[in-house]
Image (cartoon, helix red, strand yellow):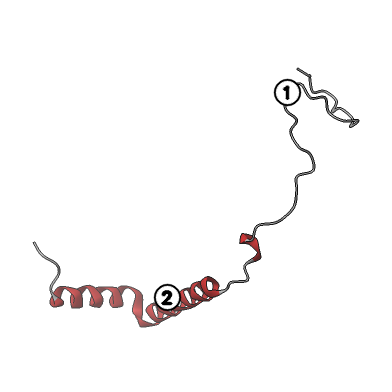
């Protein structure tokens, strides 16, 4: 049981063309080509800002156990301890 012979491929192609029609197939292939072009363009674009690391520091840092926080207001409703 090997691969399909050229006759089998031609029959499969004929069935696909009969089911979808040539107009529908050409529009699907055109959309597929546009998608590939868009993908290649975006892969080649090096100015993607979303993937760059930022130099922002967090607003607060975590204190080690036993160190009292500075004169900041304590959050309400959070038990200490």
In the rendered image, the residue lying farthest to the top is 81
The relative height of residue 22 versus residue 73 in the rendered view (above or below) is below
Q: Position of residue 38 (x, y in %)?
A: 52, 75
Q: Quadrant of residue 81?
A: top right
Nearer-N-terminus badge (1/2):
2
Callout 1: helix, strand or loop?
Answer: loop
- Determine the residue positioned at 42% across, 75% down: 28
The image quarter containing residue 58 is top right
Q: Nearer the viewer, residue 8 or 62?
A: 62
Whole-percent x, y for residue 12 in the image: 22, 72
Q: Quadrant of the N terminus?
A: bottom left
Identify the residue at image location x=35%, y=79%.
21
The circle drawn on residue 75 is none
Compared across the picture, whether 40 is left or right of 66 comes to: left
What residue lies at 19% left-to-right and 74% top-to-bottom? 9
Which residue, given by chain and number where applicable, does mark 2 sit on? 28
Quadrant of the image occupied by residue 65: top right
**Left or right: 48 in relation to 13:** right
Residue 23: image location, x then y, percent: 40, 82
User: Mark 1 sits on what residue?
Assistant: 65
> Is 26 situated left or right of 48 in this image?
left
Instruction: Give the crowd class for mark 1: few <14, some 14-19, many >=20 residues within 10 Å.
Output: few
């Amino acid at each position: 049981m090997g691969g399909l012979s050229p006759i089998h491929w031609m029959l499969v192609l004929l069935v696909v063309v009969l089911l979808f029609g040539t107009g529908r197939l050409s529009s699907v292939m055109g959309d597929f080509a546009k998608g590939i072009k868009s993908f290649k363009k975006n892969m080649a674009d090096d100015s993607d800002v979303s993937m760059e690391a930022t130099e922002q520091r967090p607003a607060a840092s975590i204190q080690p156990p036993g160190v009292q926080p500075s004169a900041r207001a304590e959050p309400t409703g959070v038990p200490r301890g």
